[in-house]
Amino acid sequence: MTRHHNFCAGPAALPTPVLERARDEMLDYQGRGLSVMEMSHRSPEFVAIAEQAEADLRELLAVPDNYRVLFLQGGASLQFSMVPMNLLGRGGSANFLYTGIWGKKARAEAEQLGFGVHTAGTSEPSGHSQVPSQGDISLSADAAYLHYTANETIGGLEFDYVPDVNVPLVCDYSSSILAEPLDVSRFGVIYAGAQKNIGPAGLTLVLVRDDLLGQRCERTPSLFDYRAMAEAGSMVNTPPTYAWYLAGLVFQWLKHDIGGLEAMAVINARKAAKLYAAIDSSGLYSNPIAVNNRSRMNVPFVLADDRLDKPFLAEAEEAGLLNLKGHRSVGGMRASLYNAVPEAAVDALIDFMADFEQRRG
């Protein structure tokens, strides 16, 4: 069996030890005689899996006791609707820091639902190459919360600070959650699609502070209600049980194999620094993002001659370097360096890029 180096932006690489354990437990979970995906979500076996996953996540992120941890469905994009539905029941407007495609989609969804929206800051003046500074943030007088995207997966633009505001802070952490330690107490709501650093697609993680529960709009569907989900342990209906189980295995891998998020942060910083150094020292490759806002998870780059794009991708795939094509909206290349992408994969990519430049540049 061959495992290639997978740089996909999502669904992304999963840790090999996690996949191996899931394989070993696929048909018979710990002697129970059935697979996790065949279990009732209310069985003692699965409840134990769910509780352990939450406990491990709380330990990894040092989640305070006054936050609920929700394991939901619908992807991070559904949170573009769920956040305003749950936080604007008492009035006010949704404020946004817009730094790329996902922030734009979040704002548009709130506006489409009929909520008041306000752009509190944007990276548009820089062509989305630099995030707005703390001093550039301007909240509306009726701001109920401020939403931002910590890391724009497509553009490779990452905040190098946590905004300091006097309203609840809501953050889409989909592509950088669990990549480093995080002070959860600075946020009202954190949400993240699983398919980058948490587990397989189909699961969405939401952390919500207790005082923000029970503020939903009157016509919010019950399945969209944070408080209802919190009170039911994320089991108002059948949750994505197998994805939840796999996420739990990833949390255990981070704790026991990696040594926690501090250790993971060191590895991630080293991987990104290597790749950006290779790009910056090249005459063929370039990255458009301001150095202090370069994403450690998603590294976009372009070739000086775009006629070389197709040969680059074809030869990369032949070399076992998969999913390097940039998002269709921006083109070029993108290497996603999520937690499960080993340092050896980055080294292999750098070696390939140098060889390609020598032959084709």
Image (spheres, rainbow, N blue to C red):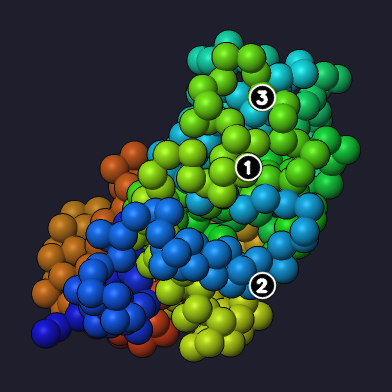
Camera-side residue of 220 and 265:
220
**Residue 237 left/right relative to 22:** right
Disc 2 versus disc 1: nearer the observer: 1
Q: Amino acid at mark 3?
A: Arg
SS at badge 3: loop
The quarter of the picture where the C terminus appears is bottom left
- Quarter-of-image position of residue 111: top right
Q: Residue at x 49, y 31 (%)?
A: 223
Pointer 1 local density, CA inside 10 Å: few below 14, some 14–19, many at least 20: few
Q: Residue 55 appears at what percent x and percent y?
A: 61, 68
Q: Amino acid at mark 1?
A: Glu
Q: Residue 47 appears at what percent x and percent y?
A: 48, 61
Pointer 3 local density, CA inside 10 Å: few below 14, some 14–19, many at least 20: many
* Separation (CA) of disc 2 from disc 3: 29 Å
Which residue was labeled with disc 3? 216
Q: In the displayed structure, would residue 338 be above or below residue 319?
A: above
Camera-side residue of 74 and 351:
74
**Residue 111 left/right relative to 140:** left
Which residue was labeled with disc 1? 231
Which residue was labeled with disc 2? 59
* Separation (CA) of disc 1 from disc 3: 15 Å
